[in-house]
Amino acid sequence: MKAWIGAVGLAGMLGSGAAMAEGGDGNELIKQCADGVKAANGATLNSYSDATFCLGLTQGVRHTMRLVNEKLPPQYQTCFPSGITNGQGMRIVLKYLQDHPDRLHEQDSDLVYLAYKTAYPCK
């Protein structure tokens, strides 16, 4: 009986963790990255939580893409130039979100990937 209760509890925790791991969507990310770009431009914000979320997500996705890029088939590779700043990364993502409002319902990390892939295609 205790094993069954433990298994149900573990399944519940894993299920809620998986839901939390899904993240937000583009509707949230566009607001977060707008604040991120404002902060990168030197503006003072009431709260920096949205700005730092955008910074962390855009930087994390970019670094992950660079890390796995060579292992991907050519059609999935992204050709980043050297020297991209975090501010530039947030601007690229914000512009992509503004230009593609039809995709804002999609997962935020997927949209960051698409923004970079669109900005830096391999020739």
Image (spheres, rainbow, N blue to C red):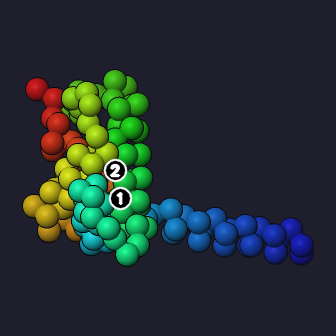
Task: Locate residue 62, reporting x and y percent.
Answer: 34, 41
Q: Which residue is mark 1?
A: 54
| 48, above or below 92, in the image | below
Element type at mark 1: helix
| 23, above or below 59, in the image | below
Residue depicted at 40% across the width and 67% down the height: 48
Residue depicted at 37% across the width and 46% down the height: 59
Q: Could you say which is closer to the camera, residue 63 or residue 23?
A: 63
Q: Could you say which is closer to the camera, residue 4 or residue 45?
A: 45
Task: Locate residue 116, reporting x and y percent.
Answer: 23, 44
Residue depicted at 21% across the width and 42% down the height: 117
Task: Locate residue 74, reporting x and y percent.
Answer: 23, 27
Badge 1 amino acid: Cys
Q: Quadrant of residue 63?
A: top left
82 left or right of 61 in image: left
106 left or right of 68 in image: left
How crowded pointer 1 is (Cα within 10 Å; few <14, some 14-19, many 20+) is rated as: many
Does residue 29 appear anywhere in the picture?
no
Q: Which residue is mark 2?
A: 58
Q: Quadrant of the N terminus?
A: bottom right
Residue depicted at 34% across the width and 50% down the height: 58
| 23, above or below 46, in the image | above
| 62, above or below 41, in the image | above
Element type at mark 2: helix
Q: Quadrant of the C terminus?
A: top left
Q: Quadrant of residue 99?
A: bottom left
Q: Are marks 1 and 2 in contact (CB under 8 Å)?
A: yes
